[in-house]
Image: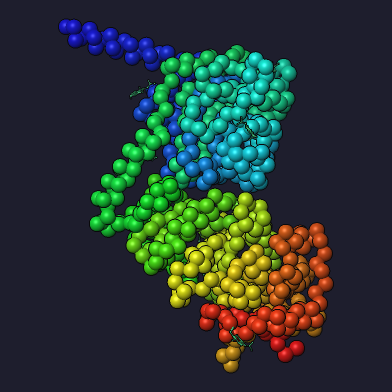
Amino acid sequence: MKHTSFLQQFLLLQLGLIAATLAFSDDQFIFSGFNQSSLSLDGSAMVTDGGLLDLSNGTAVLSGHAFYPTPLHFRKSSSGKVQSFSVHVVFSIFITYPDLSADGMAFFIAPTKNFSDARAAKYFGLLNEKNNGEANKHIFMIELDTYKNAELQDINDNHIGININSAVSLKSSTSGFYEDEGGAFKNMTLNGNKAMQLWVDYDEGDKQINVTLAPINMGKPSRPLLSATYDLSTVLSDSASYIGFSSIATLINTREYVLGWSFGMNRPAPSIDISKLPKLPLVGPKAQSKLLAIALFTLVVRRRRKYAEVREDWEEEFGPHRFSYKDLFHATGGFKNKHLLGEGGFGKVYKGVLPLSNVEVAVKRMSHESRQGMKEFVTEVVSIGRLRHRNLVQLLGYCRRKGELFLVYNYMPNGSLDKYLHFEEHKVILNWVQRFRVIKGIATGLLYLHEKWEKIVIHRDIKASNVLLDGEMNGRLGDFGLARLYDHGTDPQTTHMVGTKGYLAPELLRTGKASPQTDVFAFGMFLLEVACGQKPVKKNAEGNEVFLVDWVLEHWKNGLVTKTVDTRLQGDYNVDEACLVLKLGLLCLHPLPSSRPRMREVMQYLDGDMPLPELRQTELSLNMAALMKNNGLNSSSVSYPQLTLSFGTVSGLSGGR
Ligand SMILES: Nc1ncnc2c1ncn2[C@@H]1O[C@H](COP(=O)(O)OP(=O)(O)O)[C@@H](O)[C@H]1O
Ligand SMILES: *[C@@H]1O[C@H](CO)[C@@H](O)[C@H](O)[C@H]1NC(C)=O
Ligand SMILES: *[C@@H]1O[C@H](CO)[C@@H](O)[C@H](O)[C@H]1NC(C)=O
Ligand SMILES: *[C@@H]1O[C@H](CO)[C@@H](O)[C@H](O)[C@H]1NC(C)=O
Ligand SMILES: *[C@@H]1O[C@H](CO)[C@@H](O)[C@H](O)[C@H]1NC(C)=O
Ligand SMILES: *[C@@H]1O[C@H](CO)[C@@H](O)[C@H](O)[C@H]1NC(C)=O
Ligand SMILES: *[C@@H]1O[C@H](CO)[C@@H](O)[C@H](O)[C@H]1NC(C)=O
Ligand SMILES: CC(=O)N[C@H]1CO[C@H](CO)[C@@H](O)[C@@H]1O
Ligand SMILES: [Mg+2]
């Protein structure tokens, strides 16, 4: 009997708890933990067993949304003004490898629950590069941003922003709060696995938006972190709006939790009782050693199996960037030929669809015999995974097996540019407008690699087959830094080339040292290739090698440069743009590296912001001669036999004229 009453008491207690946890009415609600909540969830969002709203999941590049299930009437009538409201949120962000890109999360008000057209990365899973900034989105958002995205004018990698219809903030500030006493500003680190509080208040009368942040153990500071005057009646849709949270989950171990959430319309948000909130999961040394034990266990069990992989101690820190061989195996239907996208100097590329996330990927399978240089390479690969740009193919991660390395990239539905330029059976010909757009895109991507990131990244293998086309036919550079694997010189006898024949600058052949200027040289060759629709080196009827650059130079000298433009365009192109591209190509192919433009200048020429300098043929030829003399450059000094062809390209520039 005693037993029963205990049980009854326990049940009563539980019921009471639930009642305290959830309280709803039309114009206010409070969640202290999300057990039994009826939030609408999509993508990576879920409620954990412990009652936390987990927005990120951390397994794939997916965004997740959580909405209050019913839309709220921010206007009393459809023509009325947006009323005052107030929001209180307790959240926590934990990104194990902040360096490896993670953009944080957002609180938002929007007219829809359907964000299927949004981009997971960068636009907080709410917008995409096309509709970003469009007034008809009717989105009000507070971003909690842990990544500095220069394109979005982010101030740093730890800030809060007020955003209207855009991923670019109207106003933003470093995360922190102003002390009530003395008013000093105290920094707070968003990515710290610490629960913290956020308040968003809007006043109908003075149209003021206040955003306030504070650590968990504090009351609301009286001075807001951010304050903006903006009439939300001009932003929110006339009908009811949904409110909720969104996040960007990356492959990297990211956690974005909401512990509690309350809302009030025309009244303060009910205050959240911190003591009732669910607990954050354990992280740090203890959890990591547990994870390590699990990892070791799985490693031992798996080793002998079909899906055996190679893992070494130094890789531990890249854990989240690693794919399991099993997943890649299943994604590509067992690396069947049916899934083969193409084959290049580095190996075969397969199309795949990742299990769980359904993300389409391209998996590059490369063989590597030596372990030497692998550590540097993987480190570099992971660091390159941080690079994000609309003109780069995003690298998602890697996997290693005995003698094999796998690199996982975003899949580009329209394939590589070479197919459109050189394959007869490929019926689709790119028109001039598309070509010029791709050229500008690739120039932008390369400029980003050279100058816009914290380190100079040298691509080393620019060519048409490394220019991929996304669903909107934007040009994106792929395979950046890959040649580095062989550059780190595992095996001098290697038959792999550093770079590709026809695109190699003379000084690269001489010294073997890649630089931004050797990339510019290859970019010059790419320009000619796109404008002429021809490969850099071809065999003529007699079986002799013919160099595109010689041919273009010849026509240019005779004032007939437009004769070299791809005949398949049937004369349908912009003559000024075509001449600009061809001349700029020759300028980039200048034998002296110091005479080639930098990508910054290339961009200005392409944008028409700067006139192209006059190209003097004597200068080209004379300098080439000087270069040959000064450096004792001759074909026997070229270390790779395959490269002599490319050397031929260059000597052809000055030869016999
Ligand atoms: N991310 C990708 N999406 C779609 N296709 C790709 C992707 N990466 C590579 N490919 C295809 O696979 C082919 C082989 O690529 P790769 O091994 O890099 O050799 P190469 O660049 O020398 O052609 C490419 O020509 C391209 O058509
Ligand atoms: C991520 O989501 C998938 C599918 O919803 C689920 O199976 C998996 O357990 C989740 N992972 C974590 C770490 O929560
Ligand atoms: C979401 O919107 C897209 C168009 O952006 C549409 O194709 C799709 O059917 C919508 N999904 C739902 C569930 O309404
Ligand atoms: C607060 O952040 C700013 C900007 O990131 C930094 O310059 C300053 O040193 C930080 N202060 C503290 C106390 O961490
Ligand atoms: C915003 O903050 C200012 C300054 O503390 C305060 O005067 C104002 O009432 C606040 N407005 C709202 C809507 O909270
Ligand atoms: C949520 O439910 C789980 C069991 O399903 C329980 O362990 C946890 O304590 C609950 N959390 C809260 C905040 O009630
Ligand atoms: C060519 O290069 C080799 C090796 O560097 C050198 O021994 C030889 O003298 C060079 N020949 C000429 C003609 O410069
Ligand atoms: C020219 C071409 O192939 N365009 C395609 C690019 O990819 C999109 C989306 O997959 C297709 O709709 C286009 O037809
Ligand atoms: Mg490639």
Residue drawn at 59 percent across, 69 percent down: 513
Residue 460: percent from the left, percent from the top?
Answer: 58, 66
Q: Quadrant of the N terminus?
A: top left
Residue 349: percent from the left, percent from the top?
Answer: 45, 64
Decide which of 627, 189 is in the foreground and name it: 627
- The extreme bottom residue here reads 542
Residue 410: percent from the left, percent from the top?
Answer: 50, 55
Q: Vertical placement of 191 versus 353: above or below?
A: above
Name the colour scheme.
rainbow
Query: Across the whole image, how many numbered discs are drawn on residues?
Result: 0
Residue drawn at 56 percent across, 15 percent down: 219
Q: Quadrant of the C terminus?
A: bottom right
Q: Which quadrant of the render holds ligand 4?
A: top right
Q: Vertical placement of 64 versus 50: above or below?
A: below
Taking 17 as reference, is 544 left or right?
right
Taking 37 as reference, is 595 left or right?
right
Residue 197: percent from the left, percent from the top?
Answer: 54, 23
Q: Vertical placement of 572 versus 199: above or below?
A: below
Residue 507: name its quadrant: bottom right
Residue drawn at 55 percent across, 21 percent down: 88
Taking 220 as reference, is 611 left or right?
right
Residue 573: name its quadrant: bottom right
Q: Vertical placement of 154 versus 572: above or below?
A: above
Decide which of 414, 194 is in the foreground and name it: 194
Residue 636 seen: yes
Residue 364 seen: no
Residue drawn at 69 percent across, 32 percent down: 171
